[in-house]
Image: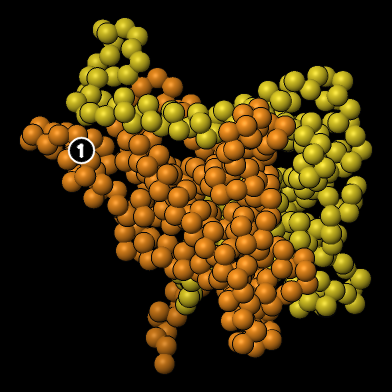
Amino acid sequence: MADPEIKSYEPYHESQSAAVTESRPARVALMTIAFAFLGIFLLLPLIIVFNEALAKGVGAYTQSLSDPDARSAIRLTLLVAAISVPLNIVFGISAAWAIAKFEFKGKAFLTTLIDLPFSVSPVISGLVYVLLFGAQGLLGGWLKAHGIAILFAVPGIVLATVFVTFPFVARELIPLMQEQGNGDEEAALSLGANGWQTFWYVTLPNVKWGLLYGVLLCNARAMGEFGAVSVVSGHIRGLTNTMPLHVEILYNEYNAVGAFAVASLLAGLALVTLVLKTLLEMRYGAEIAATRGH
Amino acid sequence: MTTAPAQAGWRFRQPSVIPGFGLTLGFSLAYLTLIILIPLSGLLWRSAALGWPEFWAIATDRRTINALEISFGTAFIAAAVNVVFGTLVAWVLVRYRFPGRRIVDAMVDLPFALPTAVAGIALTTLYAPNGWIGKLLMPLGIKVAYTPLGIVIALIFIGLPFVVRTVQPIMEEIDKEVEEAAATLGANRFQIITRILFPGLAPAIVTGFALAFARGVGEYGSVIFIAGNLPYKSEIAPLLIVIRLEEYNYPAATAIAAIMLALSFVMLLVVNLVQTWSRKRYG
């Protein structure tokens, strides 16, 4: 039973809310369009990866993954990430310390340069190393004379991966450390801590969640990079094939189950990355706040 | 900073009690130079060494021009589609409350996390003539996989989070009181959206468009599977670079890469100008 007095106010409330939000049918329509769009463009591709991987049963799936070439692709991908991610962590921390803790000329320009790899096509990121280290490259002759293999070998793959994942850690840490200011560090120093102690015991704990966030994104890209690595790797099976490259080879050989089996591992990595990222944002949203919104 | 640099004249950096400036800046600059700057300048040097006639011949080659047109054209269309749907998705996520909102919100970042090659084979399988979506479009006479339309689909997937994640935080900051004030002054919902909300969001939408567009132009992994890669028809510029490299035609690969870098640079410049203008106009 509705109170007649309240009911008489309702038209007024209705018109109020109608101006501040959409009418109910409009809301339902907008949500339906948004969900349909996300479902078609995001959810279906994800579902089809696992669907195709298991199309011929679990046996075929596990068999594809225990193939020696698939095994070596997985090992190489892990190795490349294990080298390139720490390199970019050291760079990211170092660059963030210099940029966030000090005021100097050309700082804005330096920050722009750090973001540069994001606006370069992955193929070009690989190409620049081919031009440098390839047979016709600037250093190609010298490298050949000394028997050093960079291109079509692990060092080239690592370099290309470092190039494309270069900005991830730095661009998470710089805004975060700028927002936190220098107060804590100055206090630690005035109490007698030296520079390293200040970094280990004061700065690092302050930025650890932001750092983890950056490392997570850096790692996902490092393991999944295709274009840049494809140009420098030479696609030698069992030797210079990373997981994404192996997916391509199997797919082009019409081995759908094999391609999607390896792809499902990469999709699993993407899902784990998304879950961890969301947990970090929920739990430590304030501590990585400066890094959100891009 | 607490110190006053005014009396000190020009100085490279302002004094600070915090140590480690030389070490961290030195290391950062050395690493940046070795990994990014030297290789990139190598590319520019090599393309400059080509000489104008050779460079011009490569740049005006029909196949080069078509590849660039396809790359920039499809990236433009995909970014435009993403502006519409990305803004809509951001609006639904910011303004409406529904169960599973966090999961949907997290899902938007999937294209950032999913390796491009995986996205490429998944989309191709979906849109192939016998795929889940391709089968439905076939009777309508729409072919997606192995046509330029497939490239657009892949680039929509890749670019979506750029628009959503740029627009979303700005939407969250919108003060509802402004809308209420407009409503009490007699504005209807349509007027509020076009006159009050849209101007505030315009710079973010332009930025989102630019990021999605820039990413789309250079995208390789997700596109090459679905594109069909027919020269002159569905061959993107990054793929043409790879093809030239595999032919050991280094000059052509270098020249196309240099043109792509220059065009992207000009685009970013234009977008920056539009942004400055829209901030002044609406800011």
What residue is drawn where x is 83% and y is 78%? B130
Q: How many marks?
A: 1
The colour scheme used here is by chain
Residue A244, how many percent across, how many down? 63, 61
In the rendered image of this protein, does residue A39 appear above or below residue B247?
A: below
Image-based side of B60 in relation to B279, left or right: right
Tag 1, which secondary structure? helix
Residue B134, image quadrant: bottom right
What residue is drawn where x is 68% and y is 55%? A235
Residue B24, how many percent across, how many down? 33, 31
Query: Can residue B48 be seen in the rendering of this structure?
Result: yes
Residue A64, how many percent across, how many down? 63, 77
Residue A130, how many percent across, how many down? 67, 38
Q: Residues within 10 Å of mark 1 (few under 14, many from 20)?
A: few
Image-based side of B170 in relation to A146, left or right: left
Viewer-proximal residue among B111 and B246 = B246
Outermost residue, bottom direction?
A1
Image-based side of A130 in relation to A4, left or right: right
What residue is drawn where x is 56% and y is 69%? A71
Viewer-proximal residue among B196 and A140 = A140
Q: Which image quadrant: the N terminus of chain B? A: top left
Identity of the amino acid at label 1? Answer: Trp
Q: Which residue corresponds to mark 1?
A: A196
What residue is drawn where x is 51% and y is 31%? B34
In the rendered image of this protein, which colour is used for chain A? orange
The chain shown in yellow is which? B
